[in-house]
Amino acid sequence: QVQLVESGGGLVRPGGSLRLSCAASGSIFSMNAMGWFRQAPGKPQRELVAASITSGSTHYADSVKGRFAISRDNAKSTVYLQMNSLKPEDTAIYYCAARKMPTYSYDVWGQGTQVTVSS
């Protein structure tokens, strides 16, 4: 069904900003939620960073509240993650993901984009 492609990652200095984009091949209206996850170097688990529920609500991990913002452009079927005040601990591979229904897991994933925060 839907395919997701992330872009916008790169190397930034601490305190800098990046905006990640996630382009969906299909309409994001068909998904209950779009989310951004990240997996830090050497860690087996991905963590939820931010989620945009199609009904209108958003959720953020405590570690990124006030610094990151998820948004969407429904017409372009694109979800964004604006990352400000970046810290070295934000370094990770960032993945875009989609959830079909509220009780479902995120089961559609992009390939990931590397974000490295270093001086």
Image (cartoon, rainbow, N blue to C red):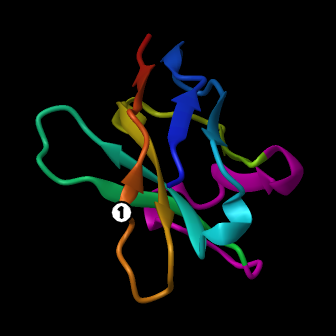
- What is the quadrant of the C terminus in the image? top left
Element type at marker 1?
A: loop
Corner quadrant of residue 104: bottom left
Locate residue 31 relative to residue 114 in the image: left or right.
Answer: right
Is 98 in the magenta? no
Where does the image place residue 31, in percent across and percent down from the top left? 60, 69
For residue 84, above or below residue 103: above
Where does the image place residue 3, in percent across and percent down from the top left? 51, 44
Corner quadrant of residue 59: bottom right
For residue 100, above or below residue 27: below
Corner quadrant of residue 83: top right
Residue drawn 47% across the image and 65% down it: 61
Residue drawn 41% across the image and 56% down it: 108
Q: Which residue is mark 1?
A: 107
Residue drawn 66% across the image and 38% down it: 84
Furthest residue to the front? 1
Locate residue 49 relative to residue 19 in the image: left or right.
Answer: left
User: Of residues 60 and 74, which is closer to you in this image?
Assistant: 74
| Label 1, residues with CA under 10 Å away: few <14, some 14-19, many ≥20 | few
Which contiguous range is marked in magenta? Answer: 55-76
